[in-house]
Image (tube, rainbow, N blue to C red):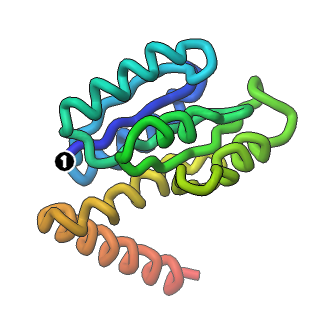
Amino acid sequence: MKVLIFCGSQSDKKIMNIAENTLNKFNIENTTYIISAHRLPDVLSDKIKEIEYEQKTDLIIAGAGLSAHLPGIIASKTIIPVIGVPIYNIDNGLLGGLDATISILQMPKGVPVATVGINNAYNAALLAVHILSIKDKNVKTSLIKFRIENTKLLMKQIKNN
């Protein structure tokens, strides 16, 4: 099982590292690419064709800021499910990430992209883990253990308040 992570630019990498780290905790193979949908469209198309040909990728997580077309462009070129992460940082816009969120959320019919909250690469990775747990018993076992540990931690915090 493999998840590919795409960043629209180098500045998105910091947020998307969270997805990498989360997937690593569940022992899910992942690879990250930095390819702009707008500035390197042919490179992106070639990479998607390569991915389709290899047939080793189960999910794609794509993060981008501003107009955030990367997740949608990827989804338009593959049948591999895409999870979009709208990214906001101080250098990429004045709308606090709403521009990126709307760009990813408002996909046309027939080209779906699952969307998580602004900068929430953690939830994107967990959504990928949940999806992958459907077909992999080891991932499912790890996810159940993770949820039990999280519950214990939260209950301990409640008791300490």
For disc 1, the neighbor class at 10 Å (few under 14, some 14 to 19, many from 20) is: some
Of residues 157 and 19, which is closer to you in this image? Answer: 19
Looking at the image, which residue is at 20% across and 62% down?
Answer: 139
For this view, does 103 lie left or right of residue 140? Answer: right
Looking at the image, which residue is at 75% across and 42% down?
Answer: 97
Q: Quadrant of the C terminus?
A: bottom right
Of residues 155 and 82, which is closer to you in this image? Answer: 82
Q: Extreme bottom residue here?
A: 159
Amino acid residing under circle 1: Met
Of residues 21 and 117, which is closer to you in this image? Answer: 117
Q: Extreme left residue here?
A: 137
- As helix, strand or loop, the secondary structure at mark 1 comes to loop
Looking at the image, which residue is at 19% across and 31% down?
Answer: 54
- Whether residue 53 is situated above or below residue 150 in the rendered picture: above
Q: Extreme front residue here?
A: 110
Q: Residue 5, position in %: x, y?
A: 40, 35
Q: Residue 138, position in %: x, y?
A: 13, 63
Q: Residue 133, position in %: x, y?
A: 24, 65
- Whether residue 41 is situated above or below residue 150 in the rendered picture: above
Q: Residue 45, position in %: x, y?
A: 43, 22
Residue position for label 1: 1
Number of numbered labels in the structure image? 1
Looking at the image, which residue is at 32% across and 63% down?
Answer: 131
Of residues 74 and 26, which is closer to you in this image? Answer: 74
Q: Quadrant of residue 4?
A: top left
